[in-house]
Amino acid sequence: MVRVDVRAKHFQLASLIVLILILAGVTSGQNAESNSADSKKIRVEKSLRIGDSDIGSFLVNKNLDLGLFRPGVIVHLRLHVLNDSSKSFDFDSVEAGCKCLSVSPAQSRLPPGEKVVFDVEIKVPKKMRSYQEAAFRVRDGAVHRFGVKMRYSGSGVVGFSSTAVRIQMPKGMNSKTVSIPFFADELSPAEFIEVETSTSLSSLHSEMDYQGKQINLTVTEESLRQGRVTGQLRIRNMETDSRGEITVDITEERPTAVYPAVIRLAQEKPEADNEQTTENTMFSGNVMVHSKGMDERASVYAEFTMDGKPLFARKSRGRNGVAFYKIKLDDSAAIELVRQGDATIRCTIVAGKTRDEHVLPVVLSSNSEVR
C-alpha cells in the first residue's frame, strides 16, 4: 500500500506557482524596461542630394529639418546622401559638432551617382531652446567635403533666454520685485510647469505669471542681511521633464557711485617760465561722484584723502546729484607710494542725509613723465 503525503504535494504545487509568478514578473519587468527605453528612441529616415549646383560655393553645406521631439529622447537618423554631381566626395573622417551627436561611417567612397547611408544618433537635451541645431562635417584629410546641419524643434519645452540675472537692492528699501522672463511652448500649459529655487534663495518669494511669461521674484531687506546672495532659479515641465535654469545674483545697491573705478593721475605740464623739479612735481586727475535718486536742486559733495591726509580737490560743476572734481597730488612721499602700487584714495560722499565712503585704487597714468 502506497501512502500519499497530501501536505507535501500541496507544498510542491504552491512552490511551483510561486516560481511561475516570479519568472513572469521578471519577464514583465524586463519588457517594461525595454518598452521604456524604446519609448525614448525615435527613428527617422531622411535623404539628401548633392548636385553640381551645390559645388558652386567653396563649402558644400546642406540643411535638414528633422521635425519635433520631446526633450530627453534619442533620435536615430538614417541619412541617405546621394552624390548626384560630377565630382567624387570620398572621405576619411567625420567631425561631429557637439557631444550630443555621433555619426558613422567615418570613412567611405562616394563617387558620382553613388549613395552613402549615415547612421546618426542625436541625444536631445532636457535643457533646450524652442529649437536646436546639430551638425557634422565630412573631410578627406584636411579638405572639407561637405557638411550637414540638422535642425529640430522641441515639444513641451520651457526655459530661460539668458543664463544669469543681476539684481541690485537699493539700500533702505524694504522689498523689490523683479520680473524674469521665461519661454514655454503650447505643449507646456501652466499646470505642467513647476518653479523652484535653490536653498540659497529660499528666503525669496517667487510667483509665476504664465500669461506674461515671467517669474516675479521678490527680494526683501531681510534676504540681504548676511550680504550678497547667489543661487539658481529653476523651471521644469513636469510632463516632458524639460528644464531651464538661471543664476540669480543679488547685491545691495550703494546709494552713491564714483567714476572711474581706478583713479589715474597724470603729471601736469610745467609752465613755460617755471620749469618743474622733482620736488614740486604735480599730478592730477578727474573724478565724477554720483548720488543716486537726487533731484536737480540737490547738492553732492566729496572729500578725498590718502593715507589719512586730505587731498586738494576742486569741484568744477555739478547737478542732478552728479559732481565733477579735479584732485591734485604733490607730496613726494605719496607719489612714491602710488608708484609702488600700494596707494588708495578714500572718497567720502555727502548728499543730504546720505554719507557714503569708497576706497579706490590709484595709479600714475602711462603718459606721465616723471623726472
Image (spheres, grey):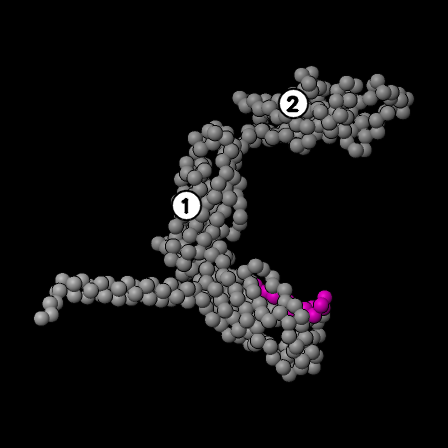
Q: Quadrant of residue 322?
A: top right
- Residue 264 in picture, x, y percent from top left: 73, 30
Amino acid at dot 1: Glu
Categorize mark 2 by other alpha carbons within 10 Å: few (<14), some (14-19), many (20+): some
Q: Main secondary structure of the magenta part?
A: strand
Q: Is residue 122 among what the camera can see?
A: yes
Residue drawn at x 60%, y 63% as measured from the top left: 96
Q: Quadrant of residue 221?
A: top left
Residue drawn at x 57%, y 59% as measured from the top left: 99
Q: Write down the region rendered in magenta.
A: 134-144
Label 1: element kind: strand
Q: Is residue 142 magenta?
A: yes
Residue lying at the far front in this picture: please name it.
Answer: 1
Give the labeled residue for mark 2: 346
Dot in front, 2 or 1: 1
Amino acid at dot 2: Arg
